[in-house]
Amino acid sequence: MTSAAATLTGEQALKRMFDQRDGKRKIEVTAAKSQLKIGQDTLDFSVKSDRAGYLYVAMAGSDNKSLYVLFPNDLDKNNRITAGQTVSLPRPNWKVRSNGPEGSNQLLVFVTDGPRDLSSLSKNKAGPFTVSLNNPDGRAELGALMSQSAIGGNAACSAASTRASNPHCSDAFGAAMLRIDEVK
């Protein structure tokens, strides 16, 4: 383990995951506000994908201590998205309030062909959200889980013809990043 790996910011960790995306897939992410007042405003954004799949949102908080999986979460597990559909997040049954500190939050929005199995991260929670520590082990675990299909390693996906015809076997994903600043 190098000291560079140990000192990655949350933004850098998400950027590394973003760099693994399939650049031919188009994901549009639009924030209602690019600045949130700490203690007052809530995060609101929309996502549109050119492909159907499964929608995931990870966030590196302004404190650079933790990475969060905001969506899906314990209150909202329905992360299917159809091609061309615009999804507004958070949905009415959950919110993300700006709690500081001052700085920038980085959101990484993924749309994957097949579902991801994030259950190994579920031991660390912040309310309904999954937390992955911003250290080399936490970043590696989150990155590996987000970039691998939940069933890609199964025997059912071992044949090349099956992998090509079954989107649940696919490790491919599109992604977009969004910066949201927290201010006093």
Image (spheres, grey):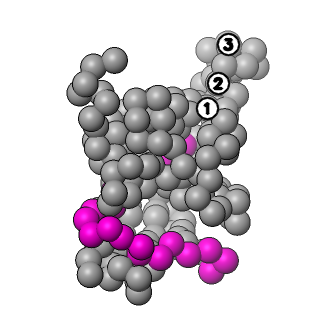
Residue nearest the viewer, comparing 118 with 132: 132
**What kind of residue is marked 3?**
Ala
Q: What residue appears at the point 26 percent right and 81 percent down from the top-left corner? A: 184
Decide if residue 60 is in sight here: yes
| Displayed quadrant of residue 17 | top left
Decide if residue 108 is in sight here: no
Residue 8 vs residue 44: left or right? left
Identify the residue under disc 1: 149
Residue nearest the viewer, comparing 21 with 89: 89
Q: Which mark is residue 152?
A: 2
Residue 45 image offset from top left, x and y in percent: 43, 72
Above or below residue 165? Residue 9 is: below
Q: What residue appears at the point 46 percent right and 63 percent down from the top-left corner? A: 48
Identify the residue under disc 3: 159
In magenta, the rendered stretch is 92-112
96 falls in the magenta region: yes
**Distance from label 1 to label 3 (Cα)?**
15 Å
Tell me, yes or no, whether the two marked residues, 2 and 1, touch with CB atoms within 8 Å: yes
**What kind of residue is marked 2?**
Gly
Residue 12 image offset from top left, x and y in percent: 28, 41
